[in-house]
Amino acid sequence: MKVLITGGAGFIGSHLADAFLARADEVTILDVASDLKVRHHLDDPRFRYVRDSIMNREIVEGLVSWCDIVYHLAAVVGVEHYVGDPYQVLNVNVNGTQAVLNVAFKAGKKVIFSSSSEVYGRSLSVPFKEEGDRVLGSTRIDRWCYSTSKAVGEHFCFAFHKLGLPVVVLRYFNVYGPRLDRIDVGRVISIFLGQLMRGTPVTVIGDGRQTRCFTYAEDAVRATVAAGVADEAVGKIINIGTDTEVSIHSLAELMIRLWGSRSRIAFVPQESVYGHSYEDIPRRVPDLQLMKRILRVTPQVPLEEGLRRTIEWFRGQGVED
Ligand code: UDP
């Protein structure tokens, strides 16, 4: 199979490229980012890295006509962007997704769209079922621009699906693992890793009772590959995650223990980190029935094991220098 992965040089995209190449498929990635996360494939004749934007229509048309299936993962992700550059988030995630879907529709190629558990917002109806309501705050709170951008992307998917395009929407729940963001930036695990490495306090935002279900990259990728091949997935939204709920306070304690660090925990008010354009989500837990039934995937890697592997990988990168 010929697989096009937009955003393939990113965290999940690079793991997805690994998985398809391991299946002997051909992979082309389209990404504006550097090849850092896919360098190990640059000599593989079944792998191609095109450094360009999903906004470049000519390039997208050429690559979509080459492939059998489009995995659309390219997006501006990360809380620092939601509150720092909402224009970029909206432009790339909404207009870029529309552009990719449009080209795929004309070429008649199936699209797997990577959406996010952010779409549920701060809904209190845990576990989140795919057909459940979204609960978001005011548009004056920049944090919600990402959630909104992904929801618009999903609407575009279903609009094109109505016109005949085969689409699958995947909502990821806090995926982590080797090659996560650079330490100190991005998501909570990479921020904690930076702090552990330096032995500085681990910053738990708020009271730390907010929860997440962290999903090891390998589990997320198995489900993502399955979504491209399972006919029953077409036209569906499917949560991709684990249902092991952990508070951020417990995550901090666990990571301190696994690292063997003497860092202590510092509770910090969210305004001091993200300013006033941020609201936290109290609990985030997926309902996994569709993932298990349609994709036939059950998460295999428990949090402690996944964190061990992630820590080992980051240590191997020399992050302690
Ligand atoms: N968080 C934290 N300390 C940090 C960074 C994040 O306590 O230094 C918290 C954040 O407030 C949220 C959770 O960790 O409750 C997960 O944050 P992340 O940005 O990784 O992703 P989210 O699930 O919020 O999209």
Image (cartoon, helix red, strand yellow):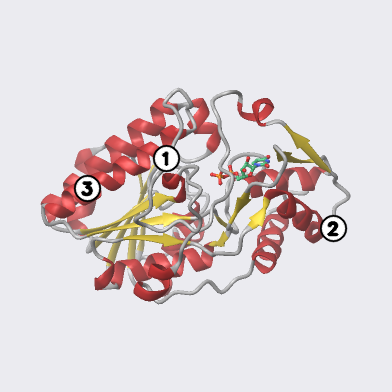
Q: Is residue 223 left or right of residue 160?
A: right
Label 3 is placed on what type of residue? Answer: Leu
Instruction: Determine whether label 3 and label 2 are within 8 Å by CB.
Output: no
- Name the secondary structure under disc 3: helix
Query: For mark 3, what is the residue?
Result: 101
Amino acid type at circle 2 is Gly
State which tag comes first along the sequence, 1 or 3.
Answer: 3
Q: Is residue 39 visible?
A: yes
Query: Can you give x and y, in whole percent of width and height, for residue 198 in the image?
Result: 81, 43
How many angstroms separate mark 3 from mark 2 (CA)?
Answer: 47 Å
Q: Could you say which quadrant of the image residue 315 lies in? A: bottom right
Classify residue 135 by image quadrant. Answer: top left
Separation (CA) of disc 1 from disc 3: 19 Å
Q: Which mark is residue 97?
A: none
Image quadrant of ligand 1 equals: top right
Q: Which residue is mark 2?
A: 260
Q: Using the image as rendered, state which of residue 21 and residue 267 is in the foreground.
A: 267
- Give the x, y percent position of residue 317: 68, 54
Q: Residue at label 1?
A: 147
Q: Position of residue 3 (x, y in %)?
A: 30, 62
Residue appearing at x 58%, y 51% in the figure:
180
Q: Amino acid at mark 1?
A: Ser
Kindly indicate the quadrant of the structure image that contains residue 66. Answer: bottom left
Comparing marks 1 and 3, which lies closer to the viewer? 1
